[in-house]
Image (tube, helix red, strand yellow):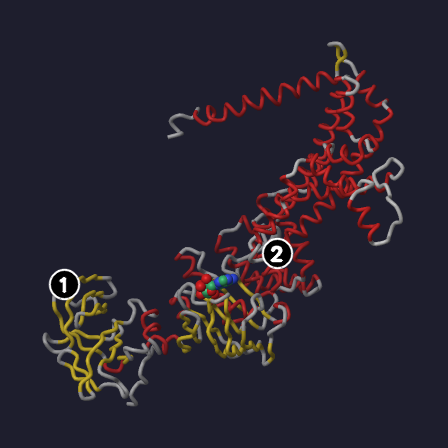
């Protein structure tokens, strides 16, 4: 077990800056996700931690010791690749045993560890088979078993579920969480799927264009996005952003008068989660022109505009709203995020 | 579409099948018949005459020795080249292009290139003389220096025929995603273990094709030998050529041709057995 410190990592590919000064600290036994859209540098960062790629500058410490310059095998880590990279010419048993064999473990220990890992991931029936005979989900399990069999200090996973179909992904997600909670291994998990990151992680680092935009628990990140990007990337529907004018330290939004955040200029962006609103009496609150109403069963999804700016809100399923209606909404004041229109950063929440 | 007209694929491959049958199978059968008959009567006279000839044992031995010397070296060089070029990012195509230049030169031209280097007044002697290593022109390609002659021919053959092995190996290496090697590295395998335990098993099909192709070609070696050694270094194809052209004995020439074919087929079978390719165990 070990903590990980990522300190000022930069990575350039030629003139292109893939990672721009990334710093992140991960505690012993913690599960941290690197979450962000495709191309934001998640894989590059993971490969630098693994030692498969060299950083242009910066330091990586695992268990208080700098690992820059150490080959991957001396970093005490294991990795699950996006395409699994399960060796096709070895049986499942030999795949799971591979790391132990490289450590020259004796046959008894190999057998013990392989059986333990195989048991955790329910792959005992396939131990004698070759991976090409297995389904994607089974191969995925083999890859995880191979990583757990060496009892790594640090486990790295690069989009391990992205090649599975939706149903299997959900099932494997739950199972991974069960298995890893037991193991207590420090884990870095790369994904572009926010539900995976939210469901699995102790903390999430949201990445965008080679920078970490925010680090926090799933709830923190959801409720208090540090930037417009984070708010827009997390949540389904994503956070709504409505630009409103500031006059005399107050924001006029519909019939509402809200105190403007300290430091606001002439305009400010009101960040509002789709479900952080309630239907109000007509003319009392924010007016929304509803374009489409979609009854989803568990909730009612409304798409339309507030102040002429596109929004999506969620109401209880029993509300009677139809496309073309104009309704009034009252936002939950505790769940408003104020953002700067220029920098896209959120203002610190006012002390209550 | 093709379900309605199942004969279409057959029609489409018919020309190539007819072409091969006419220009390959017919001469093949004729050659076999020619080698095993005498004046239209089945007979082993040609084979006996071939085996009784002074040069038969020498040419058989030379051909096999050359194959044994050349093919493993070519495979090793090709693997090294393929591995090296795999580590290169920019300029990779150019390097591959330069490495495959010998492929574009005819066998005979290749032989003449090496003749220009190794003959008495050639570049090699000039170089050695210039460096003060030898005092006067030394001959490397005469019947009095069989070892030097053998080495010269082997080197020329290696130079000429390694590129095709490399092309096949590089194609094979390209089929192996880098994650396999990276996974092995993460789990503690050093470069040698990665090469022997991961890369090599995963390129079995390419290894098999390259070895079969290169070995069969090595059994057919002729032009380079002819350019460098003439009749000082008899090989099987050379003997077939001599019986055909000098001696005008087509029967014995055909017997040599059939022998080369049998040897090649046998080598192919050995490779197919030795390097099993199981599609279940490939990437
Ligand atoms: N070896 C490389 N050479 C050049 N550019 C690269 C290389 N690897 C990654 N990149 C670029 O760096 C950026 C980040 O890539 P990556 O880390 O794979 O993103 P992610 O995993 O978040 O999708 C991408 O724009 C990608 O094109
Ligand atoms: Mg990636």
Mark number, residue B68: none
Q: How many marks?
A: 2
Mark number, residue A322: 1
Image side of residue B110 versus residue A236, left or right: right
Give how far across and how far down residue B196 sits, in percent: 68, 54
Image side of residue A232 versus residue A197, left or right: left
Give how far across and how far down residue B62 sits, in percent: 81, 34
Task: Name the chain under label 2.
Answer: A
Task: Name the chain under label 1.
Answer: A
Give how far across and how far down residue B257 sits, in percent: 73, 24
Specify whether disc 1 shares its chain with disc 2: yes
Q: Rate crowding at label 1 as few (under 14), some (14 to 19) or many (20 or more) other CA atoms within 10 Å.
A: some
Q: Secondary structure at mark 2?
A: helix
Q: Secondary structure at mark 1?
A: loop
Residue A176 visible in the displayed image = no
Give how far across and how far down residue B163 sits, in percent: 65, 44
Q: CA distance from mark 1 to mark 2?
A: 59 Å
Residue ID at (58%, 79%): A63
Q: Of the two numbered discs 1 and 2 on the same chain, state the one appearing first in sequence.
A: 2
Residue B270 visible in the displayed image = yes
In-front residue for pair A101/B20: B20
Q: Rate crowding at label 2 as few (under 14), some (14 to 19) or many (20 or more) other CA atoms within 10 Å.
A: many
Contact, CB < 8 Å: mark 1 with mark 2?
A: no
Q: Nearer the viewer, mark 1 or mark 2?
A: 1
Query: Is the distance from the Cβ of mark 1 to the nearest ligand 1 atom less than 8 Å?
Result: no
In-front residue for pair A66/A88: A66
Mark number, residue A93: 2
Residue located farthest toward the left when viewing the structure as drawn: A283
């Amino acid at each position: 077990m070990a903590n990980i410190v990522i300190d000022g990592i930069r990575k350039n590919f030629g003139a292109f800056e893939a990672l721009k000064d990334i710093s992140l600290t991960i505690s012993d036994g913690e599960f941290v996700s690197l979450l962000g859209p495709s191309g934001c540098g998640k894989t590059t960062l993971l490969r630098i931690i693994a030692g498969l790629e060299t950083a242009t500058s910066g330091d990586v410490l695992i268990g208080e010791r700098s690992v820059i310059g150490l080959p991957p095998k001396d970093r005490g880590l294991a990795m699950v690749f996006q395409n699994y990279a399960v060796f096709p010419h070895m049986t499942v048993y030999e795949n799971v045993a591979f790391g132990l064999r490289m450590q020259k473990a004796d046959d008894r220990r190999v057998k013990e560890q392989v059986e333990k890992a195989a048991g955790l991931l329910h792959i005992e029936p396939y131990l004698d088979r070759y991976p090409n005979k297995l389904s994607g989900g089974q191969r995925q399990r083999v890859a995880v078993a191979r990583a757990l069999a060496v009892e790594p200090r640090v486990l790295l996973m690069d989009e391990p579920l992205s090649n599975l179909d939706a149903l299997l992904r959900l099932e494997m997600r739950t199972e991974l969480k069960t298995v890893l909670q037991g193991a207590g291994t420090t884990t870095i998990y790369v994904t572009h799927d926010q539900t995976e990151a939210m469901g699995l992680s102790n903390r999430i680092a949201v990445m965008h264009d080679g920078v970490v935009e925010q680090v926090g628990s799933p709830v923190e990140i959801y409720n208090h996005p540090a930037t417009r990007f984070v708010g827009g990337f997390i949540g389904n529907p994503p956070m709504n952003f409505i630009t409103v004018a500031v006059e005399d330290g107050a924001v006029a939004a519909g019939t509402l008068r809200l105190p403007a955040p300290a430091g606001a200029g002439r305009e400010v962006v009101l960040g509002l989660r789709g479900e952080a609103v309630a239907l109000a009496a007509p003319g009392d609150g924010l007016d929304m022109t509803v374009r489409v109403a979609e009854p989803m069963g568990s909730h009612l999804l409304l798409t339309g505009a507030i102040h002429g700016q596109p929004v999506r809100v969620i109401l209880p399923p029993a509300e009677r709203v139809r496309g073309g209606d104009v309704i009034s909404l009252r936002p939950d004041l505790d769940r408003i995020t104020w953002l700067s229109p220029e920098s896209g950063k959120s203002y610190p929440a006012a002390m209550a | 579409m093709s379900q309605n007209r199942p004969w279409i694929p057959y029609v489409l491959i018919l020309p190539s099948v007819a072409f091969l049958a006419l220009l390959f199978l017919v001469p093949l059968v004729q050659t076999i018949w020619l080698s095993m008959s005498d004046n239209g009567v089945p007979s082993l006279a040609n084979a006996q005459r071939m085996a009784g000839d002074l040069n038969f044992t020498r040419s058989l031995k030379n051909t096999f020795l050359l194959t044994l010397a050349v093919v493993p070296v070519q495979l090793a060089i090709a693997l090294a080249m393929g591995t090296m070029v795999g580590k290169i990012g920019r300029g990779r195509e150019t390097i591959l292009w330069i490495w495959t230049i010998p492929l574009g030169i005819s066998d005979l031209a290749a032989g003449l290139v090496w003749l220009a280097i190794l003959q008495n007044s050639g570049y090699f002697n000039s170089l050695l003389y210039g460096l003060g290593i030898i005092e006067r022109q030394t001959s490397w390609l005469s019947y009095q220096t069989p070892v030097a002659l053998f080495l010269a021919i082997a080197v020329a053959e290696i130079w000429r025929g390694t590129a095709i092995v490399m092309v096949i190996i590089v194609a094979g290496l390209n089929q192996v995603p880098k994650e396999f090697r990276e996974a092995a590295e993460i789990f503690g395998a050093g470069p040698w273990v990665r090469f022997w335990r991961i890369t090599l098993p995963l390129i079995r099909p390419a290894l098999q094709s390259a070895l079969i192709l290169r070995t069969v070609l090595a059994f057919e070696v002729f032009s380079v030998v002819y350019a460098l050694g003439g009749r000082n270094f008899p090989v099987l194809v050379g003997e077939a050529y001599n019986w055909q052209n000098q001696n005008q004995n087509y029967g014995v020439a055909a017997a040599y041709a059939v022998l080369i074919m049998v040897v090649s087929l046998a080598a192919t079978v050995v490779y197919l057995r030795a390097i099993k390719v199981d599609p279940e165990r490939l990437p």
